[in-house]
Amino acid sequence: MQTLTLDAITKRFGPVLADDAISLTVRSGRILGLIGENGAGKSTLVSILYGLHRPDSGRILIDGREVRFRSPGDAIAHGLGMVFQHFQLFADMSVLENVVYGAEPGRWGVLDRKGAARRVAALAAEYGLEVPLDDPVGALPVGVLQRVEILKALYRRAELLILDEPTGVLTPPETRALFRVLRTLADQGHAVLLITHKLDEIAAVADEVVVLRDGRRVFDAEVGATTPAELARHLTGREVDLRPRRAVRPPGDPVLTVEHVVTTGAGRAALAGVSLTVRSGEIVGVAGVAGNGQETLAAIVAGARVPDSGTVTLGACDVTTWDNARRRDAALAHIPEDRNSAGVALDASVITNLTAGFHRRAPLGAHGLVSPRAMRAHARELVVRFGIRVADPTAAVRGLSGGNVQKLVVARELAHRSPFLLAEQPTRGIDLGAIEFVYRQLDEYRSDGGAVLLISSELSELLALADRIVVLTDGSIVGEFAATDADPERIGALMAGTAIAAEPL
């Protein structure tokens, strides 16, 4: 395969025009970055390319010859390989068994294990994809799992490799290792299509970039001839400011104090004597690979779980045994990790969701009674103030985009000026414009004296917002840094458990 071309691909889902005559070409030896906000048409385009959907019009051509993909099997047969954002692996099977599954070499249904191992080991060595062939997949870190997925595609002789948001769960060292692999693949004649929302990744590894917006191709360029600022402008249709934000004055008194918290649990989900403090007017970021105790820490701080030992203090109150409702009444605002399951009631109205949890407080209610008029007025004020795009506040939240649902959650939690905010993955799954909005709101909350514990898997987000960063690995805090002095390489190594712990500030 020398080139793969999508020619004027159009796809509708009912009245929604998902892709509007999109054209692009992926060439051997090149890495093409495809970027766009949520709803821009990326997922639909890739689904068509991989045979999961059929276009309403337009053509797919390989080396100038039209092809039709009616299934992923057709795409694979024509040399395409897909690495999904959520890995498609069997946890109880070995690496080797996962790589060859469905394409096992052998005769009469008997696997030629030695032959398979030789071929997979040769592929791994050729492309720098070292993996333990005999280890069960379920015991491996995510960076190795991704190599397994790439090997699966190469084993099936993929000449074009499509990667969908491949770095979402990787540490910085794992991301760099992945980019080295992609560069090796391109240098050896493969074509690579990289779908990402991270502009720094485009600059780091792609040769050329295509920007989609509202289902249309709006910009393309050689990466060396553009800038992240220009790409952001084409992504959103306006200027976007994601520059680092810092506290403008020294922090005040402690608002949250976690002391020697211990929990038991399965593996790394436990906490082993965690202590940290968040002061008024500062954002403390928690860095760590998923599954190292962040979810448990958040549950302890939010009041969803009581630690086995240790204490949690909000302001002057020991809240260790308080439930979430009592903490929210006292001092806590909370942006949960999963906005749809924990942040909103999808079938309830925008008005109900914007007032939930605060509806018994003045001016929304008093003496156990709520004021529907006050709730409507409050909701409409927040819709305008926080730029939530909804035509009718009485409509169900289910009809809002992900970015607008996140704006709703942020608006509700910040509107009542609680002294402390627990923000878990506050920009996960939202587009660049909504990310800028969240950054600005957290910065303003800090400037007004609020204290924020920011738990994020995005190191760039922590570096942009936090005043201090702690690194949580295997349930323990293994490093603490002032954000202005933070070294992403050191933090990434600590996240992966491959560096010596940093001295506390």
Image (cartoon, rainbow, N blue to C red):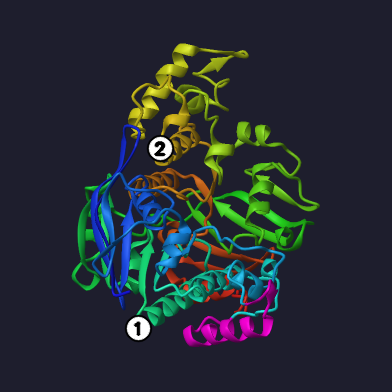
Displayed quadrant of residue 201:
bottom left
At 67% from the left and 80% from the top, the residue drawn is 112
Q: Say left or right for 49 vs 87.
A: left
Q: Are marks 2 and 1 in contact (CB under 8 Å)?
A: no
Q: Is residue 401 found left or right of 420 in the rendered image?
A: left
Whether residue 228 is visible here, answered yes or no, is: no
Q: Nearer the viewer, residue 186 or 323?
A: 186
Spot occupied by residue 157 in the image (x, y as percentages of width and height): 46, 75
Q: Can you identify the residue that label 1 sits on?
A: 187
SS at badge 2: loop
Q: Residue 71 location, x and y as percent?
A: 45, 55
Q: State the residue in front, 74 or 257.
A: 74
**Labelled disc at residue 401:** 2
The residue that appears at 43% across and 19% down in the rendered structure is 394
Task: Give the quadrant of the C terminus.
Answer: bottom right
Amino acid type at mark 2: Ser
Q: Position of residue 140 (x, y in %)?
A: 65, 71
**Is residue 18 found inside the magenta-colored segment of the image?**
no
